[in-house]
Structure formats: structure tokens, C-alpha cells
């Protein structure tokens, strides 16, 4: 391991169990969760397509999508320099520099950085909570990842519609309690909701995640897919989650 790729104090190196890939994470800041993994299985990337991940964190989505698809180029945009640094080192550790690029920048500036209509696919696992919801004394990095402090849903959607090519696809994981707002705003910004799947921790519980696909300038028709159940019982994944969460 070269010095520029070295795992630093407080960080850990986690195996992704796909293509031999690994990822650098710091438990004191923010580690990826099942939501990112499920989004990587829900998103569709066709051969030769160009993909942008907004708010990439430690780069989990570009790395998994590179492993799972035949996309041509993956770019991860991240405003927090520490997270972007970890993502860049993970890319180099996996020798993916020719496929994945990590950039430091603000989502609100994305269309200026990359140019209009420059991507086939956009993915995002944005902050779920508006400022007032659940805010605690957690550290700054975790607060930014979880709360709309530096980036709002409107920022994500307004930039995505500018960045996507006509009929380009938008993929997001979010929380069901904001679905009415999400679907309304997607339509308002010109990203038509086309496909949605709700994720349930157990079959008899309420959903706690929503996977959503939209198309820039798409026709009005939304398909709601069958529920995705995470656990058969406590600590035991369903077969479908085993297939997805096996990376």
C-alpha cells in the first residue's frame, strides 16, 4: 500500500465482497449503510453510460456501480474534503482511476462544474432530514450527511434536471415520510417519477426506505414494484437481500 493510499488513524478498511474491492471508512464520521447498497442494486446503468453520484460520501455508490454495471465513467461529487479524500484513496486502492473520479465540490454548483446535459444517469443518497428533524449534538460530518444543512432536496433536483441529458435517468433513496413532497417536487422540476420500490425492515412493519427512479422529461406513468423485505426474522436477511447485500 503506497503512502497516498494509506489507511489513516481512526479509519478502517472494509471488504466489499465484489471484485475484491475494498473501501476506506471512518466510524467517527460516517459509514455507508444498506440504503446505498440497495440503491446500487436498484439503479440501472447501461453499457457506455456516464454516471454522476451527488454527495458520494466515501464513494460507495460509484465503486459498487462500477463493479455491477458496464458504465463507461463514474464521477462522485462530495463537499466534505475528508470524505472525498477517503473516497479517492479507495478508488486508487482498487485501481479504478480510469473509471472513477472523485471531485470536491458543492452540489449547488454541479451544473456549472460539469456542464448542462452531460450525464446519462444521476444517483444520490441525500440527507433525509430537514434541519428541524432529529437534529442532535452529533459530530459535524454526520450531521451534514443526515440533515439538509448544506444541500436540500430542491438543490438535488434542480441540479439533476440540468445535468441529465433528455430522457436521462435519476435514482434516489429517501424516506417514505417525505414521499408526497419528493414526488411533487420531482414532477415540478421536470423529472418524472417512473419506478418506485418501498423497503420494509420486516414484513409486518412500516417501510423505512423508498427507492425511486425518475426520467428527465418522461411521460407520466409510475410503476410501484413489489415490496422489498429486509429480514425474515431478527438478524436473518431474506434471500433477495442476501443477493443484493452480497454486493
Image (cartoon, rainbow, N blue to C red):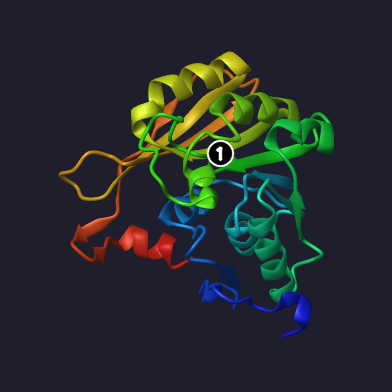
Residues packed near mark 1 inside 10 Å, few (<14), some (14 to 19) or many (20 plus): many
Residue 22 falls left or right of residue 135: right
Q: At 49% across and 58% down in the image, what residue appears?
A: 32
Q: Position of residue 128 (x, y in %)?
A: 45, 37
Q: Position of residue 43 (x, y in %)?
A: 55, 46
Q: Nearer the viewer, residue 239 or 73?
A: 73
Q: Quadrant of the N terminus?
A: bottom right
Judged left or right of residue 176, residue 72 is: right
For residue 21, which quarter of the picture? bottom right
Residue beneath disc 1: 171
- Is 221 on the left or on the right of 227, as rendered? right
* Residue 97 appears in view: yes
Q: Quadrant of residue 144?
A: top right
Instruction: Farthest residue to the front: give it.
Output: 137
- Outermost residue toward the top in this view: 188
Q: Residue at x 71, y 52 (%)?
A: 47
* Above/below status of 2 relative to 132: below
Q: Secondary structure at mark 1?
A: strand
Does residue 49 sit above or below 67 in this rendering? above
* Residue at image point 58% right, 59% down: 60
221 to 143, vertically: above or below: above
Residue 48 vertical placement versus 90 (above, below): above
Q: Position of residue 58 (x, y in %)?
A: 60, 59
Q: Going 81% across and 29% down the picture, which residue do you hit?
A: 116
Q: Position of residue 50 (x, y in %)?
A: 75, 46
Q: Nearer the viewer, residue 216 or 79?
A: 79
Evaluate whether residue 69 shows in this view.
no
Amino acid at each position: 500500500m503506497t503512502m497516498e493510499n494509506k489507511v489513516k488513524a481512526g479509519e478502517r478498511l472494509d471488504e466489499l465482497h465484489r471484485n475484491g474491492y475494498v473501501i476506506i471508512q471512518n466510524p467517527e464520521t460516517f459509514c455507508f449503510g444498506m440504503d446505498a447498497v440497495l440503491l446500487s442494486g436498484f439503479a440501472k446503468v447501461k453499457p457506455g453510460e456516464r454516471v454522476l453520484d451527488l454527495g458520494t460520501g466515501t464513494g460507495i455508490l460509484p465503486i459498487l456501480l462500477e463493479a455491477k454495471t458496464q458504465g463507461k465513467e463514474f464521477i462522485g461529487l462530495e463537499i466534505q474534503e475528508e470524505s472525498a479524500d477517503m473516497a479517492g484513496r479507495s478508488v486508487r486502492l482498487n485501481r479504478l482511476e480510469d473509471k472513477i473520479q472523485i471531485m470536491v465540490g458543492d452540489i449547488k454548483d454541479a451544473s456549472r462544474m460539469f456542464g448542462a446535459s452531460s450525464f446519462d444517469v444521476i444517483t444520490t443518497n441525500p440527507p433525509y432530514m430537514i434541519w428541524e428533524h432529529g437534529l442532535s449534538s452529533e459530530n459535524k460530518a454526520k450531521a451534514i450527511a443526515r440533515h439538509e444543512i448544506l444541500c436540500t432536496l430542491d438543490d438535488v433536483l434542480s441540479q439533476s434536471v440540468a445535468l441529465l441529458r433528455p430522457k436521462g435517468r435519476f435514482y434516489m433513496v429517501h424516506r417514505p415520510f417525505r414521499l408526497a413532497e419528493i414526488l411533487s417536487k420531482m414532477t415540478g422540476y421536470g423529472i418524472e417519477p417512473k419506478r418506485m420500490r418501498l423497503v420494509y425492515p420486516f414484513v409486518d412493519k412500516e417501510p423505512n426506505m423508498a427507492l425511486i427512479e425518475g426520467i428527465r422529461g418522461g411521460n407520466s406513468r409510475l410503476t410501484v414494484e413489489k415490496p422489498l423485505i429486509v429480514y425474515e426474522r431478527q438478524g436473518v436477511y431474506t434471500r433477495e437481500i442476501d443477493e443484493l447485500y452480497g454486493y
